[in-house]
Image: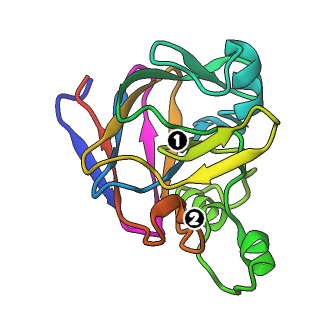
Amino acid sequence: MSTRTEFLLVPAREARAARVPAGRRFRVIDVEGGQVVDLFAFVEDDVAEYASAEHTRVAIDRLFPLPGQDFVTNHRRPILRFEEDHSPGVHDMLCAACDPYRYRLLGVEGHASCAENLRTAMAGLGHPHVEVPQPINLFMAVRVNPDGSMSWGPAPTAAGDHVVLRAAVPSIVVASACPQDLNEINHYQPTPIGLELLPD
């Protein structure tokens, strides 16, 4: 058991990874406000199993869990429990992580991306080859309209807004401060986030 808080400051446009034991809670914090977080979770002893948006949507019959519900893996078992939401409650599990291909389509080469941030963070823990799953896009304002179209808006969070999750199995959690600065989701200016492991 751990009796101390462990805090990682994730710089704008970067990601950080943390090993989270089963049962341990952690907080994802929008430090300055208006910042999307791409959150990923992998089973620590088999990173081929990971938090899966498509499997979670089926398991809960919702586009995004409510507090008290679980995110499940591609093997259909719980990996994270969504325990608390101290934010406007606007999140997304429809949009892929930004990647170099996305920025090339926008005419930009060499732009930081959540996909590359994930790969870098996981390689730092000895996992250089991982799937880039559909992320849990915390604080991301994507709306599905009645006609089936999607609308994008800026993240509505204020400084200090956060969510709390609990690992159901020993996990590797990666949080990326989304680098997207070519549309309004981060108010055109990515900012830092916090990843905080809470005492047991």
Q: Residue at x 28, y 54 (%)?
A: 31
Pinpoint residue 171: horizontal percent, then vertical percent. Answer: 53, 34
What quarter of the picture does the C terminus occupy? Answer: top left
Q: Which residue is mark 2?
A: 117
CB atoms at circles 1 and 2 under 8 Å apart? no
Disc 2: CA contacts within 10 A as few (<14), some (14-19) or many (>=20): many
| Numbered range of the magenta stretch | 11-24
Q: Which residue is mark 1?
A: 172
Residue 56 painted magenta: no
What quarter of the picture does the N terminus occupy? Answer: top left
Extreme-front residue of the structure: 147
Marks 1 and 2 sit apart, C-alpha to C-alpha, by: 14 Å
Is residue 9 toward the left or the right of residue 93 in the image?
left
Q: Is residue 160 above or below residue 112?
A: above
- 197 and 67: which one is in front? 67
Q: Quadrant of residue 22?
A: top left
Q: Residue at x 77, y 30 (%)?
A: 54
Amino acid found under the numbered disc labelled 1 = Ile
Q: Which mark is residue 42?
A: none
Pinpoint residue 41: horizontal percent, then vertical percent. Answer: 57, 39
Element carrying mark 1: strand
Pinpoint residue 77: horizontal percent, then vertical percent. Answer: 68, 17
Q: Is residue 27 above or below residue 153?
A: above
Extreme-left residue of the structure: 4
Is residue 190 toward the left or the right of residue 93 in the image?
left
Q: Is residue 40 above or below residue 16?
A: above
